């Protein structure tokens, strides 16, 4: 499926359900769901690199919202789609009803002057905090996008995930894959959900932003993320254990 087809299912107001699993399961998962989904393809390419710069206030308001489990929470980022250079300033907000809404405005690639050039856009969504926003961390990953052949549903699968801050510190997680089902309704009838369940993968909340801030920027309240770190460690151990077994055979 090309970009025109994807545009029809680009839900800006939706229910998001995330799943973390070993990247070693990715090939098997894609094989199992192939009859039910189309794959985004541009110029013969189906894997796409993304780069994201996250912004926060001096007191890390958005990070604290995430790690304390606040139901109404916000993320502000500049995301670049490296396949075509398109760059957007995005405000992603999750409501206490569990719905995610995303608003965005196109930017020039590499433009960090987000406040002055997008003041009206940001003021409308997150005023009065917009003027104090500063870049705090960068994230890079590779993404595959699937679109259901039968349902109003889109799937993103991210891997090759890494973070770096403005000081040169970095963390990479080649063993981790993150799948997200984006739908206007429940995922219980989703073929993708059913295949994940067969592989023993359960849904879990996860924020690339909060995780990167804790690991790379040593942001406060890391104890709130301890269950996620334990899950990531289990996935890492599974990935490298199975990788070692594959090499022996």
Image: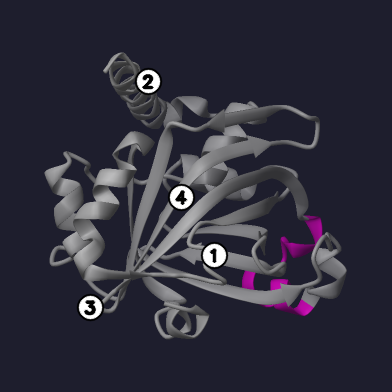
Q: Are marks 4 and 2 in contact (CB under 8 Å)?
A: no
Specify which label sits upstream in the sequence, 4 or 3. Answer: 3
Specify which label sits upstream in the sequence, 3 or 2. Answer: 3
- Residue 94 x %, y %: 45, 63
Specify which label sits upstream in the sequence, 3 or 1. Answer: 1
Labelled disc at residue 19 = none
Q: Is 127 colored magenta in this rendering?
A: yes
Q: Are marks 4 and 3 in contact (CB under 8 Å)?
A: no
Q: Which residue is mark 1?
A: 92
Toward the front, the furthest residue is 249
Bounds of the magenta segment: 120-132
> Does residue 24 lie above or below 61 as drawn?
above
Q: Residue at x 73, y 36 (%)?
A: 165
Specify which label sits upstream in the sequence, 1 or 4. Answer: 1
Labelled disc at residue 151 = 3
> Viewer-nearest of labels 3 and 1?
3
Q: Which residue is mark 2?
A: 240
């Amino acid at each position: 499926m090309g970009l025109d087809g994807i545009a029809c299912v680009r839900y800006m107001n939706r229910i998001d359900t995330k799943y973390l699993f070993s990247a070693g399961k990715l090939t098997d998962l894609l094989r199992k769901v192939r009859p039910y989904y189309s794959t985004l393809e541009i110029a013969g390419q189906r894997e796409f690199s993304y780069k994201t710069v996250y912004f926060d206030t001096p007191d890390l308001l958005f990070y604290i919202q995430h790690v304390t489990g606040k139901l109404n929470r916000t993320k502000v980022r500049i995301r670049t789609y490296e396949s075509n250079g398109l760059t957007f300033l995005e405000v992603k907000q999750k409501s206490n009803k569990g719905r995610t809404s995303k608003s965005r405005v196109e930017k020039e690639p590499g433009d960090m002057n987000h406040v002055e050039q997008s003041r009206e856009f940001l003021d409308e969504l997150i005023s009065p905090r917009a003027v104090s926003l500063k870049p705090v961390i960068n994230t890079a990953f590779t993404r595959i996008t699937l679109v259901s052949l039968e349902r109003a549903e889109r799937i993103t699968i991210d891997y090759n995930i890494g973070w770096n801050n403005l000081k040169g510190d970095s963390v990479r997680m080649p063993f981790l894959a993150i799948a997200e089902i984006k739908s206007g309704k429940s995922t219980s009838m989703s073929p993708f959900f059913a295949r994940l369940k067969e592989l023993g993968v359960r849904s879990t909340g996860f924020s690339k932003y909060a995780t990167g801030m804790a690991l790379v920027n040593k942001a406060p309240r890391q104890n709130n993320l301890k269950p996620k770190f334990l899950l990531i460690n289990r996935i890492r151990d599974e990935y490298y254990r199975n990788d070692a077994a594959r090499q022996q055979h």
